[in-house]
Amino acid sequence: MAGSSGQQAPDYRSILSISDEAARAQALNEHLSTRSYVQGYSLSQADVDAFRQLSTPPADPQLFHVARWFRHIEALLGSPCGKGQPCRLQASKGRRVQPQWSPPAGTQPCRLHLYNSLTRNKEVFIPQDGKKVTWYCCGPTVYDASHMGHARSYISFDILRRVLKDYFKFDVFYCMNITDIDDKIIKRARQNHLFEQYLEKRPEAAQLLEDVQAALKPFSVKLNETTDPDKKQMLERIQHEVQLATEPLEKAVQSRLTGEEVNSCVEVLLEEAKDLLSDWLDSTLGSDVTDNSIFSKLPKFWEGEFHRDMEALNVLPPDVLTRVSEYVPEIVNFVQKIVDNGYGYVSNGSVYFDTAKFASSEKHSYGKLVPEAVGDQKALQEGEGDLSISADRLSEKRSPSDFALWKASKPGEPSWPCPWGKGRPGWHIECSAMAGTLLGASMDIHGGGFDLRFPHHDNELAQSEAYFENDCWVRYFLHTGHLTIAGCKMSKSLKNFITIKDALKKHSARQLRLAFLMHSWKDTLDYSSNTMESALQYEKFLNEFFLNVKDILRAPVDITGQFEKWGEEEAELNKNFYDKKTAIHEALCDNVDTRTVMEEMRALVSQCNLYMAARKAVRKRPNRALLENIALYLTHMLKIFGAIEEESSLGFPVGGSGTSLNLESTVMPYLQVLSEFREGVRKIAREQKVPEVLQLSDALRDDILPELGVRFEDHEGLPTVVKLVDRNTLLKEREEKRQVEEEKRKKKEEAARRKQEQEAAKLAKMKIPPSEMFLSETDKYSKFDEGLPTHDAEGKELSKGQAKKVKKLFEAQEKLYKEYLQMPQNGSFQ
């Protein structure tokens, strides 16, 4: 039992004599901290005696040494013996045991928060059923071309959906509707149908002029009654353009011009007066339109255009798409149950929601999203539709705040049979019935544009909770922010109405998405040249990084050469990489803050660029594995956001969707061979001093390859960097470079011209003999002494100061003239 050689047996008597248990344990811990009681330490009887005084190891984590000492002895002896019981050491035979292990404290994981319009706060996102997320999104009313306002909502929701599905790994079931029955659709379909019929009749010029004058009368009344400034401006513009187009036709008719000239004026007036005539024809003949197929043709066409626009924007299709026209039976049943539950009433063949009855119920609340807007008659009437706000319709309601669940059809409107007579669905009810049918009594997320909060979404909530008799139809309501055009509301009257197709003619789907990613999804986004220029620069910045990394990865190395030793620079960059990943995760948890994510990604790329530049400065290749990891991570994040197509393995694809991998993998080996051959030729040309070959080499780089979408970047002392870049981008870069060079050339020529003029002026001055320099200044001087002025123009003698000044100028000219005479060409200008 003796300790090993040189080790003194411990003496615990003074420690064990301490009466206070806590103080005794602390003293024992301090004593044991100076001793090696494991790994080679032999126990003594004193250890055993002290061990017997303890029943269990101390719970206090600060008494670390006592705990390890106790467990070490316990492993050798078993549990402590009771008082008075003999304890004997067992032969350990050198057996050792592992020390106690404790898990790290760790950090609290970041949880996803979403801005919930129901609370107007960021709330922790908790789906109702594990990782499954049910999501309903309000789709478009399809009666015209999709515009950038639509893009604002559907790209933003596409980004949110992708992040929840592909980053946070939720199982998202995404449902979207198409509104193909609506007052706007009915009116536009009738107008189109009636105008087409009007054109088929080929009205004579006189008849057309008469019809236009007839249409202008109600139009003028409508214009005078309009108070909305944007609508008034649009109507005034239509009136002005119609009047301008009318005058030439009137003159042509009065002048009895040829048929061809008159027909040309007719065509112009028909084009300008289309909206005016369509509205007039609808007001007079609209009630005669009874064929339901007329009302389905228009929405079917524009729905197809909408889907094509969404595909062009790389917006994922919904998991299920519902059309109002296909859910009329379900809507009828939904309305009937609301009536049965006491929250709806029938009036003159229509069915209305009783907002007062609903609001007075203890378990319900009306106006959850925008309570301050309840009673806003303008908003409520816009929600009812232009065909549903006549005086007779409004008189059918018990309260002005009530809204239509089902509308009795008037002549000239589509209709479906129901218990209350032929009619059609109200606007708000469609989403409730379709979402309720597919998603049940409560969904996780409902999404839509900010302007739909009231009355549409508040009315949806009310009628759905009236149907299900609950108070939780939607758990999280998400609303995307407005879109403005260069700071102004998008409006046809302001001529800033931009369709998605128009926007895609100017910028790619990726560039539009990057612009949206660089802004918060719930705030107003201004679509302007500045916004898009920022997106273009961001895309270029990332693309250059990806191209540089691809070039590094193409450098040939053996299998072991892929793994290089890390220095301080690599360790620091890797630390920054993980810091940025943490920051990006926290930003995504914070209401999917893509704006911060994009800034963090930009900062990470900037750090990579600094690292690559530092390696390049010392003629060393950067660490390929580290840069590849970073580039792959950025590619992964951009794929999640929908900014990179799936087939691209690293960076932005080249050559368009579906062709990038084949193009890059096919042509790059040949381009690499061409680059190496060119470098060899350039080296020989420099050594042999053959400038013509160098010029041809530069022409290949600057003129020929950009036309093929290839960029060669020459760096002194390093291999040429080969990049596949969009051809139009390269041609634009080349043109900008030529413009810069042309500007430099012009500035150089201007500087040379000014210098030449200055030298010519100096030479002209030098040629003048000092005795003649003042003689021509008769307005200043009247008398001279050998060319030197003595009197001013009035005949007064110059003062001493004036004389001194002219003498100084005279002497300076003497010096200049002497220099002139000494010049090689002296005398040639005399």
Image (spheres, rainbow, N blue to C red):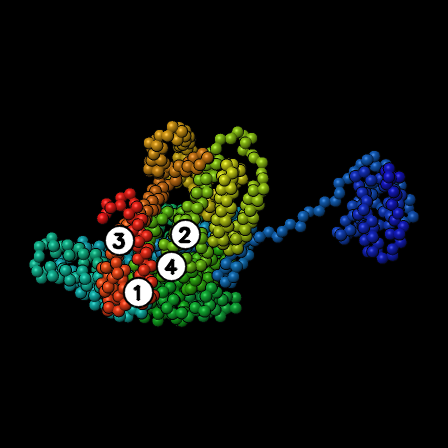
Query: Residue 71: x and y, percent?
Result: 80, 44
Instruction: Say the numbered circle drawn on residue 484.
Output: 4
Locate residue 801 relative to residue 607 in the image: left or right: left
Disc 2 is placed on an element classified as helix
Q: Residue at x 31, y 48 (%)?
A: 819
Type of the residue with mark 1: Lys
- Earlier in the chain: of badge 1 and badge 4, it is 1
Q: Is residue 649 above or below residue 473?
A: above
495 displayed left or right of 269: right
Mark 4 or mark 2, earlier in chain: 4
Q: CA distance from mark 2 to mark 1?
A: 33 Å
Q: Amino acid at mark 3?
A: Pro
**Which numbered disc, 4 or 2, marks the residue closer to the eye?**
2
Q: Nearer the viewer, residue 356 or 554?
A: 554
Q: Which residue is mark 3?
A: 769
- Residue 448 falls in image quadrant: bottom left
Return the x and y of residue 473 as percentages of the image width and height: 49, 59
Mark 1 residue element = helix
Separation (CA) of disc 2 from disc 3: 64 Å
* Mark 4 → mark 2, Cα distance in angstroms: 16 Å
Q: Residue at x 44, y 55 (%)?
A: 519
As measured in the structure, the alpha-carbon distance from the residue carrying label 1 to the one carrying label 4 is 17 Å
Q: Which residue is mark 1?
A: 231
Q: Amino acid at mark 2?
A: Ser
Q: SS at mark 3?
A: loop
Foreground mark, 2 or 3? 3
Pointer 1 with pointer 4, Cβ within 8 A: no
